[in-house]
Image (cartoon, rainbow, N blue to C red):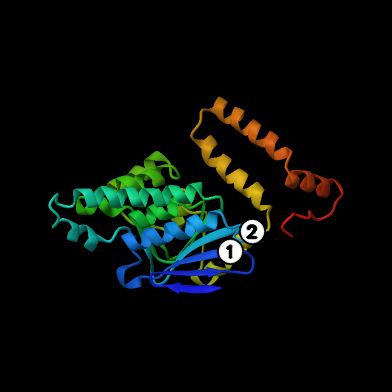
Amino acid sequence: MKDKNQILEIDKTSEGILRLLLNDPKNKNALSDKMIVQLKEQLSKASTDNSIKVIVIAAVGDVFCSGHNLKELTDARSNEDDGKSYFLDLFNLCSSLMQMIISCSKPVIAEINGIATAAGCQLVASCDLAIASEASKFATPGVNIGLFCSTPMVALSRNVNKKDSMKMLLTGDMIDAAEAKRISLINDYVSAEKLNDSVMSLAKKIANKPLSTVKIGKEAFYRQYEMSLTEAYEFTSKVMTDNSLSEEAVEGIASFLEKRNPLWKYD
């Protein structure tokens, strides 16, 4: 199933992988109001659609995502309040998108083939997994134009250590894919020719896992991350107890002991 929906192209494979393709290369796939709204709509639908197992966010052209549309920001300055209410609405809207990626019950993979800057880098950091082409580059360059990347900083600093995060934020310098992997902004990088196959191979592997177990694990991962060590162990002990009573755990453990392939209920 493929639906070309203006600036966001939507494709769902037979394996249950939803591909969301940013398709606005003339605007460097910027996170315009319209792009953010469409991404949120698709994530919301996918989160409750049991036929979808994994979500991939990719892009057309040599820019994965350039961040916010600076023309839209500039146009808003003609408003009576110099754009203040628009800016707040936009940054809140974008922040809600990033949080929706985290709260979405399905794993979200970023497939980056090109440049990801500012809120585009934030998008990469917000995804559960990220694989890039070896020529891809990343930056949070807001400091260079007098607009510090404060909201991208939230996602960046939750994936990358403090020193490397601050270096990116304070210098605005581009980093290559090798450096992005070293600092854990992405999981891996491959040649551009192998990028799609690598991402889809990873997505298919995850899609073959029991859907409810993946949902439990993703939610628990992000919730425990914000807790103290003691709270995290108390929380995850309860999660594992409840998970142990699930049909998937009963079948999975039985199949392991009986040396056979598990028969998940959606098979």
Evaluate whether residue 26 shows in this view: yes
Dot 2 amino acid type? Ala
Label 2, secondary structure: give it. helix
Residue shown at the point (28%, 50%) measured from the top left: 89
Residue 177 or residue 88, whichever sits in front: 88
Query: Against 225, is 86 above or below?
Result: below
Q: In which quarter of the image is the C terminus?
A: bottom right
Q: Mark 2 points at which residue?
A: 207
How packed is label 2: few (under 14 Cα within 10 Å), some, or many (20 or more)?
A: many
Is 206 on the left or on the right of 68, as rendered? right
Asked which quadrant contains residue 166, the reply is top left
Q: Mark 1 points at which residue?
A: 17
Q: Earlier in the sequence, mark 2 or mark 1?
A: 1
Residue 257 or residue 75, whichever sits in front: 75
How packed is label 1: few (under 14 Cα within 10 Å), some, or many (20 or more)?
A: many
Q: Quadrant of the N terminus?
A: bottom right
Q: Please tell me how many numbered marks the rendered image carries.
A: 2
Residue 186 or residue 68, whichever sits in front: 68
The mark found on residue 45 in the picture is none
Label 1, secondary structure: give it. strand
User: Residue reaching furthest right?
Assistant: 258
Evaluate whether residue 133 shows in this view: no
- Residue 222, x across and y down, in percent: 52, 41
- Residue 238, x across and y down, in percent: 65, 31
Asked which quadrant contains residue 60, the reply is bottom left
Q: Do the residues labelled 2 and 1 touch (CB within 8 Å)?
A: yes
Dot 1 amino acid type? Ile
Residue shown at the point (35%, 52%) measured from the top left: 94
User: Residue reaching furthest top?
Assistant: 230
- Residue 174, x across and y down, in percent: 34, 57
- Residue 33, x across and y down, in percent: 32, 59
Residue shown at the point (78%, 53%) measured from the top left: 262
